[in-house]
Amino acid sequence: MNPLIIEKTAATPKIHFDFSKKLFEIIGCSRPEDVRIFYMPIIDWLESFKLTIPELEKPVNPLEFKFKFDYFNSSSAKFLLDILVLINQIHEKGMAIKVAWYFDENDDDMKEVGEELSEVVDLPFEYIEVPKKTKTN
Amino acid sequence: MTLSQTNKIFEFKGNLTFPVIEEILNKIKILLQQMEVEQVVQKRLYAILVESLENALKHKTPLQKNASLQEVEMSLQRLPESLLLKIGNYMPAQKAPVLIERIKELNGLDLAGLNHLYRTSIANARISEKGGAGLGMIEIARSARNTIRYHFTETTNKNSFFVLEIEIATTIS
């Protein structure tokens, strides 16, 4: 399956989903001008990926989905929830997965919003605090 | 309609577009950094700004017949212990009662109640034709940790000028 790569802009995050590299990450800020136009290709890609799972060789380690947001608006939150629901379905289809939720040091609000999404979708997250001087994005 | 002039650190009047929002956000971000506002407050105010500006963009009513009336007005004021955002836009007068009820509902909830409402709302949210998820006002209320104030001025038979006032404390206890 072809990777999905969308470059980062001031209003949209970088998306890099690539099963061959075991790389799944969303990095940046999300407040797209048109939330549907931005997120639907990502939803479609994950839907297609879900269908290919029976044919895929299962990796030794769980697939890690990394979420590293500076900020996302409320309409992006709805699509993030949809993405997490799909990740959960991918897990239920036999693919071991892990969700890593990054937040800046002292940004408890970003951690809490991750906890909310985790609770709503009933999927455990691993929370990773990023020290200020060594921001990963 | 006038927004108060006192202690204003930023002001915008005009036609709001997505690139204009981008510009406003960048300018205010720099201002808050220069003012050395706490990082948590900067982030919460940023969230309030994005949601309120996007709401104004989605729901503003163009007033092409009266060019002297600005479509959207906003200001940010520095008060002794808080920052006050005022944002106003024209909207159909008939939609006012629904919006008032919504704000009253949110103002009646504490943070735990707002968080609970957010969780139940996001689980059932649908993206509207205008691209909203119906979560913006909840996000504004819980980011502000404060009551949302509002007032309407009827300017024509069909349109009201709706002003939202959101105050956020500059010190997090």
Image (spheres, coloured by chain):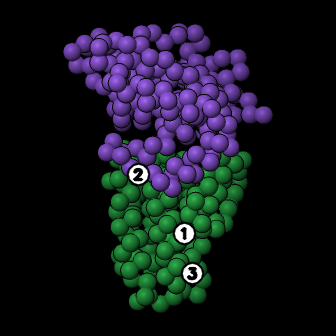
Residue B14 drawn at (x, y percent): 35, 20
Q: Mark 3 points at which residue?
A: A96
Q: Mark 1 points at which residue?
A: A65
Q: Colour of chain A?
A: green
Q: Which amino acid does label 2 sit on?
A: Arg
Instruction: Categorize mark 3 by other alpha carbons within 10 Å: few (<14), some (14-19), many (20+).
Output: some
Q: Name the residue under label 2.
A: B126
Colour purple belongs to chain: B
**Mark 2 — on which chain does it sit?**
B
Q: Which residue is drawn at 25% across and 14% down?
A: B67
Q: What is the CA distance from the residue labelled 1 to the residue labelled 3?
A: 11 Å
Instruction: Categorize mark 1 by other alpha carbons within 10 Å: few (<14), some (14-19), many (20+).
Output: many
Residue B117 drawn at (x, y percent): 58, 45
Residue B17, by quadrant, is: top left
Q: Which of B67 and B124 is in front in this view?
A: B124
Q: The residue tagged with tag 1: helix, strand or loop? A: strand
Q: Which residue is drawn at 36% across and 46% down?
A: B128
**Mark 3 — on which chain does it sit?**
A
Say above or below: B71 vs B59.
above
Does residue B32 appear anywhere in the picture?
Answer: no
Comparing marks 2 and 1, which lies closer to the viewer? 2
Q: Which amino acid does label 1 sit on?
A: Phe
